[in-house]
Image (cartoon, rainbow, N blue to C red):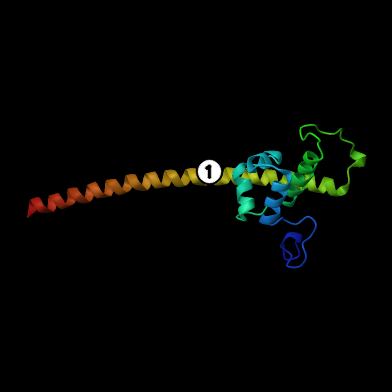
Amino acid sequence: MPNHPNRSKGAKAPSANPCKEEVRAAREAAGLTQTAAATLVHATCRSWQHWEAGDRRMHPGVWDLFRIKSGALASGESSDTQPEPVEDDLSDAVKTSWDRFEAAMEASEIEQQTIDDLQDALKRARAEAARWKKKAERSALRHLKALKNRA
């Protein structure tokens, strides 16, 4: 998708992925720890660390949510209180950002589950390989002893 807004080579689109410097600067400006910032957007601390390190790109919907919620904190509003939803007053941009955020969270959960499953499978495969290696070594030793006894 060369014409996707997050893959453009030119100027940054308004809803593009933030760079690692932007993520860290926004968190520090809000006076939050990595854990607090991650909790604010319903992510793990490790995910936030990946975003700040530049190992992974933060989804624009998550970025928008963080900026909205951290702005509310800076203005003294509680992030726990939800305003009364008024569908007519919501702009298309906010709806789009929320849709992106939900999609990112769903994809993140799927990705994390897939990663966890793969890590578990790798651990099991390594353990099985170690068992087979020991079995092969024992078999080889028995074979060598049998050859020595024949000689």
Please say if 77 is above or below 22.
Answer: above
Mark 1, residues whose alpha carbon is within 10 Å: few (<14), some, or many (≥20)?
few
Quadrant location, the C terminus: bottom left
Going by the numbered disc 1, the residue's amino acid type is Asp
Most foreground residue, 136 or 99: 99
Please say if 119 is above or below 85.
Answer: below
Q: Is residue 97 left or right of residue 150?
A: right
Q: Toward which corner of the image does residue 105 lie, by quadrant?
A: top right
Q: Position of residue 40 (x, y in %)?
A: 71, 39
The residue depicted at 22 percent of the width and 51 percent of the height is: 140
Q: Toward which corner of the image does residue 116 lie, by quadrant?
A: top right
Q: Position of residue 14 (x, y in %)?
A: 80, 57
Tally of numbered discs? 1
Q: Position of residue 52 (x, y in %)?
A: 64, 52
Q: Position of residue 70 (x, y in %)?
A: 76, 43
Q: Is residue 46 left or right of residue 101?
A: left
Residue at which label 1 appears: 117
Q: Residue furthest left?
A: 151
Quadrant location, the N terminus: bottom right
Q: Residue furthest right?
A: 88
